[in-house]
C-alpha cells in the first residue's frame, strides 16, 4: 500500500482512496499504486464491487501537468482505464469537488459515476492546447451524446452535477455523505444483479447521431478557433467516436494528442498557465495582508461602473461616489442594465442580480468612503483632477485604507505625493469593460508599502482577475507597448497598405481584430483627445476626427458601417484621403505584404517589451505575456509577445529591426540590448527588474 492510494473493505465493497494533495493529480506516484490496487481487487473474491474515491477537497482534478512534454512513466492513465474495463464487478467513481481532465477520464473508465451535488465535471484540456488524451473524446460521447460532448470538450467548461445527471454523465447526484451513498449504490448494483457494460461498449447514444448537424457545429467551431489547432482536433476526435469502432477511435485520439502535445501552440498555452501563477508571486507575499471588506469607487463612468461590478461579482460591498445625483443615477442605471443583459442571456439568475445590486451603495458625499478599506479612483484622466481627489481622500479615508488610481498613463508617484500617506497609494489599472476583462496591472509606486502591494494580488484573485505587478512609466506595460505596436500604422497606410490589409494581417496572425477595426470600436476621438493633450498629431486619424468620423458610433471611421451594424466596409473616401496625404508628403506608394506589416508592428512590440524588462518596469518576460494575452487579445496559441519572439527567432527580429531602423531612423526599431542578448542566449532569464 502507498501513502497516496489506500484500500479499505466496507462490508464487501472495496473503497480505493486517492490522497495526493492538493488536487489529487494523477502523478506517477498515484498511477502506480492505483494500478496495482485495481489489479489485485479485480481477482479478489472478498470485494464484490469497487468504489474509487478521493481524500481532501476534490476528486482527481487532472493530470500532473508538470509531466507533460516528458517521457511518460508507466502505467499511464490509459492503462489504468483499460484495466478498469476488464473488471467484471461493478466499479463506481465517487466524485466530489471537481472531476477534471484525467480525473473525469478515470471516472469514465468505471461502470458507474455518482457525484456530490456541488461537484463539477469537465474536460478542460483544450485550454492547454490539448485534447483529452485518456479516452475522454471517445467515452464521453457514449454517455452524453456526441453534440453535448463536443460542446463540453471544445469549451473546456465544466458542468454541474445536476446537469451531469440530466445528460447521463453521472448515474446519481447526492446530498450528504457521498462515500456512504456511493457504497450503498455499489451494493445495490451488486444486489440487483443486472448486466452492466463498460462505457466503451455502450454505443446506443451514438447510433442516432445526426452527422450533418454535428459537422455544421464543427464548421462553426473551426470558424471561431482563429488558428487554434486544439479545438479542431477535439472535434475530429469526437467525430471519430461516432464513425469509427471504439479501439480505432481511441488510437486516433492518441495520435491527435501526441501531435498537439509536441506542438508550439500547446507549449505556449502550458507556458501561459504557469506564467499566470508566476505573475502572482511577488516579494513580500508572506507579509501580513490588509483586510479588504468594503471597497469605495470614485467615478461611476465607463471604468468606475465596471470596476464596481467586478467587486460586487466577487461578493464585496461597494460604495460608489459621483459628483452629482444625475451622474450617479446614470452610472447605477448602466450597472443595472448590464446585469439585466446577463439575466436575459441566462448567465445570471434574477435572484443573483438582486443580490449583487444589493451590494451597491451610491453617494455624492466623499465622507461615505470613510469606512472603505480600499478606495479606487476612476475619474477623468487629468492630473489636476486626480490630485484634487486624492487630497480629499487623504482627509477622509480611514488609517490603513489602500488608495488606488485607475489611471491609464499618469504618474502614480506624483498622485501619491498629493497625499500625506504615499505608502498606501498604488495603481490598479483595470481594462475595459472592467467587469469582463481579466487583466489587472498593479502599479507599484516608489513609496508603495510592501504590505499594500502584497494585499492586492489576493484581492485580484477574489474578483477573478489575473494580476501583474508593473512599475511606473507612461502607459505602464500594456499601453506603452501598444503605442509601440501602433507607431507605424499610419506610415504603413501612407506607403501603400489599406486599413483592411493591415487588419487582415493581424487576424491571420490570430488577433481577434486588427488595429484599425479596434480603433473604430473604441472610438477614434479618444486617441485624438489624448494626442491633442500631448501636443501630438496623426496625419490621417486627425483628419478623420475633424470630419466627425469617430468610428462605429458615428457610422464612419477607418471603415464605413451600415446603420446598427458592426461589419466594417472599406470606405473609398478614406482610401482617397490616404492617397492625398501620401502625395502631399511626397511618399511613393507601393504594395505592402503581410510580412512587412508584422515586422513593423509586432517586432517593435517585442522590442518595447525588451526595453521594459531592461528598465525593470516588469519583473519577468512571462509577466509581459500575461498582460498581452489577458488585456489585449494576443493569440494564446503564440504565448504572448515575448514567448512568440522565441518562436519567431530573436536573431531574425533583431536583423529586421536593424533593417527598418536603417531605412526610417525611427527609435522604435532600434534593437534593445536585452533583445540582442536574448538573440544570443535564447533566454530572457535575468532580464527583468523589481517593479
Ligand atoms: P468616464 O468619463 O467614463 O468616467 C469618469 C467619471 O468620473 C464621470 O462619470 C465623472 O462624472 C466622474 N468624476 C469626475 N470627477 C469626479 C470627482 N471629482 N469625483 C467623483 N466623480 C468624478 O471615464 P473612464 O473611461 O471611466 O476613465 C476613468 C479613468 O480610468 C481614467 O483615468 C482613464 O484613463 C482610466 N481608464 C480608462 C479606460 C477605458 O478604456 N475607458 C481603461 C483603463 C483605464
Image (cartoon, rainbow, N blue to C red):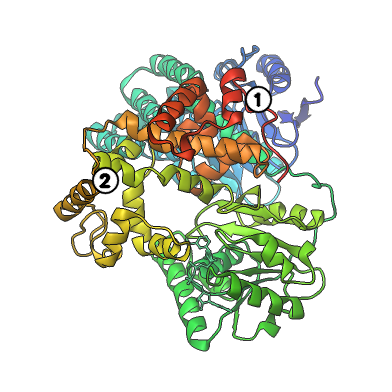
Let me know if residue 515 appears in the view. Answer: yes
Q: Is residue 225 above or below residue 473?
A: above
Q: How far is disc 1 from disc 2 in space, using C-alphas?
A: 43 Å
Residue drawn at (32%, 60%) of the image:
542
In the image, which disc is placed on residue 66? 1
Q: Secondary structure at mark 1?
A: helix
Let me know if residue 513 appears in the view. Answer: no
Q: Is residue 240 found left or right of 470 in the rendered image?
A: left
**Residue closest to the eye, 616 or 63:** 616
The quarter of the picture where residue 43 lies is: top right
Q: Is residue 329 above or below residue 25?
A: below
In the image, which disc is placed on residue 499? 2
Residue drawn at (36%, 36%) of the image:
225
**Does the beta carbon of the residue at mark 2 sit less than 8 Å from ligand 1?**
no
Q: Is residue 3 found left or right of 441 in the rendered image?
A: right
Q: Report crowding for label 1: few under 14, some 14 to 19, many 20 or more residues within 10 A (C-alpha).
A: few
Q: Report crowding for label 2: few under 14, some 14 to 19, many 20 or more residues within 10 A (C-alpha).
A: many
Tell me which label, 1 or 2, sits earlier in the chain: 1
Amino acid at each position: 500500500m502507498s501513502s497516496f492510494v489506500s484500500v479499505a473493505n466496507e462490508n464487501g465493497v472495496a473503497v480505493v482512496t486517492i490522497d495526493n494533495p492538493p488536487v489529487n493529480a494523477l502523478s506517477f506516484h498515484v498511477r502506480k499504486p492505483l494500478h496495482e490496487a485495481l489489479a489485485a481487487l479485480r481477482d479478489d473474491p472478498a470485494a464484490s464491487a469497487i468504489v474509487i474515491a478521493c481524500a481532501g477537497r476534490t476528486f482527481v482534478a487532472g493530470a500532473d501537468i508538470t509531466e507533460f512534454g516528458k517521457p511518460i512513466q508507466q502505467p499511464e492513465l490509459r492503462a489504468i482505464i483499460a484495466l478498469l474495463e476488464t473488471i467484471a464487478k461493478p466499479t463506481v467513481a465517487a466524485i466530489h469537488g471537481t472531476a477534471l481532465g484525467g480525473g473525469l477520464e478515470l471516472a469514465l473508465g468505471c461502470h458507474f459515476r455518482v457525484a456530490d451535488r456541488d461537484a463539477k465535471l469537465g474536460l478542460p484540456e483544450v485550454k492547454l492546447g490539448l485534447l483529452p488524451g485518456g479516452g475522454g473524446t471517445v467515452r464521453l460521447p457514449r454517455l452524453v451524446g456526441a453534440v453535448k460532448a463536443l460542446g463540453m470538450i471544445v469549451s473546456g467548461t465544466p458542468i454541474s452535477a445536476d446537469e451531469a445527471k440530466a445528460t447521463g454523465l453521472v448515474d446519481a447526484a447526492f446530498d450528504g455523505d457521498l462515500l456512504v451513498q456511493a457504497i450503498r449504490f455499489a451494493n445495490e448494483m451488486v444486489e440487483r444483479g443486472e448486466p452492466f457494460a463498460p462505457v466503451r461498449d455502450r454505443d446506443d447514444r451514438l447510433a442516432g447521431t445526426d452527422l450533418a448537424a454535428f459537422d455544421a457545429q464543427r464548421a462553426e467551431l473551426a470558424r471561431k478557433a482563429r488558428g487554434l489547432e486544439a479545438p479542431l482536433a477535439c472535434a475530429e476526435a469526437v467525430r471519430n467516436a461516432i464513425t469509427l469502432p471504439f479501439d480505432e477511435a481511441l488510437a486516433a485520439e492518441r495520435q491527435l494528442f501526441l501531435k498537439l502535445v509536441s506542438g508550439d501552440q500547446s507549449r505556449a498555452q502550458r507556458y501561459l498557465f504557469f506564467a499566470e501563477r508566476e505573475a502572482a508571486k511577488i516579494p513580500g507575499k508572506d507579509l501580513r495582508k490588509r483586510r479588504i471588506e468594503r471597497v469605495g469607487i470614485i467615478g461611476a463612468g465607463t471604468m468606475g461602473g465596471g470596476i464596481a461590478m467586478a467587486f460586487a461579482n466577487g461578493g464585496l460591498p461597494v460604495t460608489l461616489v459621483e459628483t452629482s445625483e444625475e451622474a450617479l443615477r446614470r452610472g447605477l442605471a448602466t450597472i443595472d442594465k448590464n446585469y439585466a443583459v446577463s439575466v436575459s442571456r441566462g448567465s445570471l439568475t434574477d435572484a443573483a442580480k438582486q443580490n449583487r445590486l444589493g451590494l451597491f451603495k451610491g453617494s455624492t458625499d466623499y465622507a461615505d468612503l470613510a469606512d472603505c478599506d480600499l478606495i479606487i479612483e476612476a475619474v477623468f484622466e487629468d492630473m489636476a483632477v486626480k490630485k484634487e481627489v486624492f487630497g480629499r481622500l487623504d482627509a477622509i479615508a480611514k488609517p490603513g485604507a489602500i488608495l488606488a488610481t485607475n489611471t491609464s498613463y499618469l504618474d502614480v508617484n506624483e498622485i501619491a505625493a498629493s497625499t500625506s500617506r504615499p505608502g498606501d497609494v498604488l495603481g490598479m489599472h483595470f481594462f475595459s469593460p472592467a467587469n469582463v476583462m481579466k487583466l489587472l496591472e498593479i502599479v507599484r509606486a516608489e513609496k508603495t508599502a510592501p504590505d499594500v502591494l502584497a494585499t492586492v494580488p489576493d484581492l485580484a484573485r477574489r474578483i477573478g482577475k489575473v494580476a501583474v505587478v508593473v512599475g511606473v512609466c507612461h502607459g505602464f506595460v500594456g499601453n506603452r507597448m501598444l503605442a509601440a505596436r501602433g507607431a507605424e500604422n499610419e506610415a504603413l497606410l501612407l506607403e501603400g497598405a489599406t486599413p483592411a490589409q493591415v487588419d487582415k494581417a493581424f487576424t491571420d496572425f490570430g488577433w481577434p481584430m486588427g488595429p484599425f477595426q479596434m480603433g473604430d470600436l473604441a472610438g477614434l476621438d479618444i486617441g485624438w483627445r489624448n494626442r491633442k493633450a500631448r501636443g501630438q498629431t496623426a496625419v490621417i486619424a486627425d483628419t478623420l476626427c475633424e470630419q466627425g468620423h469617430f468610428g462605429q458610433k458615428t457610422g464612419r471611421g477607418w471603415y464605413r458601417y451600415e446603420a446598427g451594424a458592426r461589419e466594417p466596409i472599406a470606405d473609398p473616401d478614406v482610401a482617397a484621403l490616404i492617397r492625398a496625404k501620401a502625395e502631399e508628403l511626397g511618399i511613393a506608394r507601393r504594395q505592402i505584404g503581410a510580412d512587412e506589416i508584422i515586422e513593423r508592428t509586432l517586432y517593435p512590440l517585442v522590442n518595447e517589451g525588451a526595453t521594459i524588462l531592461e528598465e525593470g518596469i516588469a519583473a519577468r518576460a512571462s509577466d509581459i505575456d500575461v498582460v498581452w494575452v489577458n488585456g489585449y487579445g494576443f493569440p494564446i496559441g503564440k504565448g504572448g509577445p515575448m514567448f512568440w519572439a522565441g518562436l519567431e527567432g530573436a536573431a531574425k527580429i533583431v536583423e529586421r529591426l536593424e533593417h527598418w531602423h536603417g531605412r526610417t531612423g525611427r527609435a522604435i526599431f532600434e534593437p534593445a540590448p536585452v533583445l540582442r542578448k536574448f538573440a544570443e542566449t535564447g533566454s530572457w532569464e535575468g532580464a527583468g527588474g523589481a517593479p
